[in-house]
Image (spheres, grey):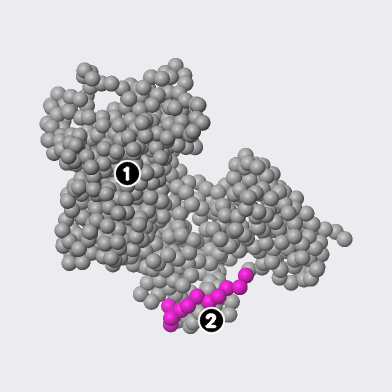
Amino acid sequence: MFRRKMEIVRSAALLAAAAILSAPASRADSTPQVLSNGMEVINVPIAEGPCEPTWKSLGDHFQRPAWWRQAKIGMWLHWGPQSVGEDGDWYAKWIYMPQHAWGDYTRVYPHHLERVGHPSETGYKDMLLRWKAENWDPEKLMALYKRAGARYVIGQGMHHDNFDLWNSKYQPWNAVNIGPHRDILGGWEKAARKEGIRFGIAFHGDYSLFWYQPAFLADLDGPRKGIPYDGAQDYTGKDTWWQKMGLNLKDLYGIDLKDDVVFPADFKGDPNEFRMRDPLSHGIPNGNLKKNHEFATWYATKWTHRVIDAIDAYSPDFIYFDGGGSYPFCGHGTGRGLRADATPRVIAHLYNRSIKKNGQLEAMAFTKGNEDSRAIAVNVESNVPREIKRDQPWQTENGLGEWFYYKGTFYDSGMVIHQMLEAISHDGNYAINIPLTPTGELDPGGLKTLQDMGAWMDVNSEGIHDSGAWDVWHEGKVVMAGGNLGAGHAATPYTGHDIRFTTKDGALYAWLMAWPADGKAQIRSLSSAAGAITAVTLLGSVEKLVWQQTDDGLMVTLPAAKPCEFAYGLKILGQNLKAAPIGPDAVKAAADGSLTLGAQTAETHGQVRAEARVGPGNIGYWNNPKDWIAWAVRFDHPGKFRLAALVAAPGQPVPFVVEAGSSHLTGTTKPTASHDEYALVDVGEIEIKQAGIQSIKVRPQAAASWNPINLREMKLTPVSP
C-alpha cells in the first residue's frame, strides 16, 4: 500500500511538470511556423551559443573530438522493459501482431498469449510493471565493460516503446515512476564517470509517433477476432492501475492514426489487416500527418522537451538517434508524420552546452540520416563500410544476438573480436551490445564474452585504442557477413591469409584473423616495395621472431605458443611504410587436374563480397546487377573443362554469364529453399587454348532478370580427350 501511495505522489509531480504538454493547443497556437525548407519550428528554447537549430549551422561548427579516436571501443547498453519478454527486439510491437511480424518474430504473439494472456487484457503497459531490474549493478557491469576495452558506453534513454529510463520531467511513463523505481540512465552515467568512460544517451522514441498503431487493432481471426487490443479500448469509468496514478495512455501509445492511413485506390480487403502489414509504416505515408497534424506537433514538442531534459540532467558526451536512413521528424521513413526542426534543435542544444563548458565543441550526435553530413557522426548498423572511411567519425554498432534479451542467445567471443577488427581497420569505432536479462544480469555466455574480450585486450589493446586505418585495411578474401551476430558469424572461415591493419604512433599493426596452419605468416602488402622494415614483434610474446622482407612480402615465423586467442597482432616498425601493390593469387589445379574456385580466392567488384553464412564461405551481397567477380586461374596445359556452379537462389531462375578465355557460357540457377541451401548448376564446357594464368569472370546476364544469389564455388573438371 505504501508503494502504491508513493507511486501516486511521484506521478502527481511528474504530471504537474508535463501539464502544458498534455493540454491541447489553443486556436491561437494552432498555426506553426514553417521554414522555407518545409520544416516546422518546434517552439522549445535551447542553450545559447553559436549553433543554431539548422543542419547548416551544425555543420559549420562540428568537429571530430580527439577523445573519439582514443576511445575506439564502446558498449551498447540496449536494455529496458522490453527485455521482460525475453523474446528479442521490438517486443512492445510484436505482441500486437499475430500476422505480418518480420521473420521469426511471429513467435512473439503466441509466446505472450501463453505467458501472460491476450493483449486486449494484458498489453505492453502492464508488462512495464513486471520489469523490476532487481539484480542490476551498474558499477559491477561498468568495471567489466572497461576491462573488455570499452572507453565509451551508449545508455538507452528511450526506445520505440516510448518509456523513459530516467526521472523524466515530461514523460510520466518512466522507470522511476513505474517498474524498477530507479533512475536507470543516472545509474549508468554515474558508473561510467567513476570508471573514466565516456557516456552517451540513445533516443529512439520518435518512432512512437506511429510505432504503436497495432495496439489500436485486434486479432484478424480466431476466437478473439475483432476484440480491441488495450490501446483501442474505452476506459471511461474503469478503475485501472494507471488511472489511479494519474497516467494517460496517450502519453505511452499515442493515438489511433486510422484517419491518416492511405489505402490503395482499388483496395477492397480488411482495413485492419492492411494496417498490420508494414511494421515501419502501418499505412501511414511519408510526409506530415494530415488529419492528426496537431497531435504530431504535440508529440514532437514533447519529444524535444524530453531529450533536452536528459541532456541537461546528465551532460552526455554524445547523443544517438535511430532511423532507417532517416532521422527523427525528418518527414519520411522512420521519421514520417512530421517534418520539423526537432533533431537539429536538440543537437544544437548539446553542442552549445559543450562549447560553453569546454571552451570548444567536444560533444557529438549520431544519426542514421541527416541534411548536412558535416554536422554529425554516423552509425553503420550490423555491418562495416566496404572501404576505409575517413570523412566522418563513425562506428559499427551491433548486437550479440537480439538487441533486447532473447532467451537462447548464441554467444561466441571470437566473432565479436573479429568484427571489431573489421570495423577499426576501416578507421571506425566499434560498439557491441551484450544483452542483459530482465533482472539486469549477464547470461553466463555474455559474462564469458566480456571476460574473453578483457583477456584479449590485456595483450592487444596498444594496437586498438587511439589507432587509425593504414593505407589498406586488409589482405585476404574472407570478410564477416553483416547482420546481428550469431552462429553463422562465428563460423566465418578466416585463414592465416586474412589480415587486418591499424596504425598508431608510427607503428603498423597487422592482425592475423586466424593462426596460420604452418605457423608462418606472409604479409604481401609489406614486400620490399613498401619500404624498409626495422622490427617485428608479436603482441603478448617475449620470443624473438624470425622474419624476412622479400619481393613477395614480409615472411614471419611465429612461435610455437599462441599469446592469446581469436586474433593475433604483429607490431611492425619501419620508415614511412606504404602498402605495396599485390598481384592476383592464382588458383592452382588439384592432383586430378580439377580446379575449385571458392569465395576466399575470388576478386570482387562492386558491393558483392565473400561472407560466411552456413557451412563454407560463399559470395554474397550480390544485389546489384552491375557487380561481378573473377578468379585468376593457373592452367598447366591447354584443354577442355566441364564447368559447374554451386548456387543458392530462392525464387525464379536467375541467368548468369561465365567468361573463360574465348568461351562465354550462360548458366541458370535452380530454385532453392533459401539463400543457405545450394543446388549444382551445369554451366557447360569451356576450352582453354593455352597454358598460363587466365581470368574467369561471372556476371549477371541482365539487370531485368537479376535477383540476389549466393555462389559457393565454381568447379572446373577436365574433360578426357
Q: Which residue is mark 2?
A: 529
The span picked out in magenta is 573-584
Left of 99 or right of it: where is 312? left
Q: What residue sits 61% from the left and 48% below the top?
A: 707
Query: Nearer the observer, disc 2 or disc 1?
Result: 1
Residue 479 percent location from the top left of the image: 52, 58
Left of 139 or right of it: where is 472? right
Residue 406 figure quarter:
top left
Quadrant of the rendering where the N terminus is positioned: top left
Residue at mark 2 to residue at mark 1: CA–CA distance: 57 Å
Per the image, is 577 magenta?
yes
Among numbered discs 2 and 1, the one appearing first in the sequence: 1
Residue 180 percent location from the top left of the image: 23, 36
Mark 1, Cα crowd under 10 Å, few <14 / some 14-19 / many 20+, is many
Q: Which residue is mark 1?
A: 338
Q: Secondary structure at mark 2?
A: helix
For badge 2, the amino acid type reads: Ala
Q: Secondary structure at mark 1?
A: loop
Quadrant of the rendering where the C terminus is positioned: bottom right
